[in-house]
């Protein structure tokens, strides 16, 4: 079927995007308001965009006629931390997605311990095996939405998930990270992973084809 995105209602565009672009990693974003109130919320319109500089993008949609607290805080302070979500923290992550007023500290609500960040003020979530401290690189403001492009200035990776720190080898399966799948509440892990080396070069591919 064909879908004219220029004519579809926003809700329908969301439905088609979120049920096809899967799995999506989850950025569990911690921020501080300009008054110092802590905030945490998950966002799955998220990914790494570049490594030089190291840029991440998080899509924070509107909350009716307002900005979500995370978007407001990022614009006000230009700092945020992206924590990745291990399976063991799934329920706590879900709880922090609650639509709560700005003065509510979702970290306290979900009884989540935090650890200090090194370069930015918002703390990181202790149970997350990976946290990226970010400074706002480019804000894309679309009425009450924000696409926050952040530059990673510090990464924390759990010691026991480093296979060989001298070579920066990470034991990725050990991180046991969850991702968002289709539907309202379906999540996945990397358990169905399969291996496939990248083609080496066009020349090698041509030679391979010539042999068969
Ligand atoms: C797994 C998950 C992924 C989510 N992804 C997004 C997202 O990509 N963009 C968004 O605007 N809201 C997303 N939400 C909803 C926000 O987490 C929710 O609106 C939250 O209340 C925002 O909090 P804040 O106002 O403190 O920023 C997601 C919720 C869950 C549970």
Image: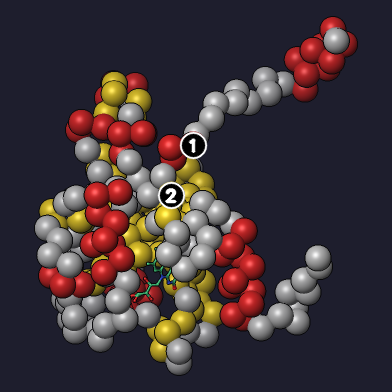
Task: Indicate yes or no: mark 2 CB to ligand 1 under 8 Å.
Answer: no
Residue located farthest toward the bottom when viewing the structure as drawn: 65
Work out which quarter of the rendered image holds the C terminus and state it. Answer: top right
Measuring from the top left, give residue 186's x and y in whole percent.
45, 59
Q: CA distance from mark 2 to mark 1?
A: 9 Å
Image height check: is 185 above or below 102?
Answer: above
Instruction: Name the one closer to the observer, 145 or 4.
Output: 4
Measuring from the top left, give residue 68's x and y in whole percent.
37, 80
Q: Are marks 2 and 1 in contact (CB under 8 Å)?
A: yes
Q: Quadrant of residue 18?
A: bottom right
Label 1 neighbourhood size at 10 Å, few (<14), some (14-19), many (20+)?
Answer: few
Image height check: is 161 above or below 100?
Answer: above
Q: Is residue 182 left or right of residue 113?
A: right
Q: Is residue 27 visible?
A: yes
Q: Quadrant of residue 170?
A: top left
Q: Is residue 153 left or right of residue 121?
A: right
Image height check: is 113 above or below 106?
Answer: above
Q: What residue does disc 2 label?
A: 188
Q: Which mark is residue 192?
A: 1
Image height check: is 103 above or below 190?
Answer: below
Measuring from the top left, give residue 195's x and y in whole percent.
55, 26
Element at label 2:
strand
Label 2 neighbourhood size at 10 Å, few (<14), some (14-19), many (20+)?
Answer: some
């Amino acid at each position: 079927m064909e879908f004219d995105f220029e004519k579809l209602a926003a809700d329908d565009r969301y439905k088609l995007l979120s049920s096809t672009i899967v799995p999506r990693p989850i950025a569990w974003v911690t921020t501080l308001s300009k008054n110092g109130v802590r905030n945490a919320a998950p966002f799955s319109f998220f990914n790494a965009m570049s490594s030089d500089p190291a840029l991440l993008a998080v899509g924070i949609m509107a909350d009716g006629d307002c900005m979500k607290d995370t978007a407001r805080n990022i614009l006000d302070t230009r700092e945020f931390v992206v924590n990745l979500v291990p399976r063991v923290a799934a329920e706590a992550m879900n709880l922090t997605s609650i639509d709560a007023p700005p003065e509510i500290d979702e970290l306290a609500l979900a009884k989540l311990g935090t650890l200090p960040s090194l370069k930015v003020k918002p703390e990181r979530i202790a149970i997350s095996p990976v946290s990226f401290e970010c400074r706002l690189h480019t804000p894309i403001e679309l009425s009450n939405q924000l696409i926050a492009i952040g530059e990673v200035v510090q990464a924390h990776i759990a010691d026991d998930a480093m296979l060989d720190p001298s070579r920066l080898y990470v034991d990725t399966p050990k991180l046991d990270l969850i991702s968002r799948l289709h539907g309202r509440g379906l999540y996945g892990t990397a358990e169905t992973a399969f291996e496939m080396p990248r083609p080496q070069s066009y020349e090698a591919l041509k030679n391979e084809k010539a042999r068969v």
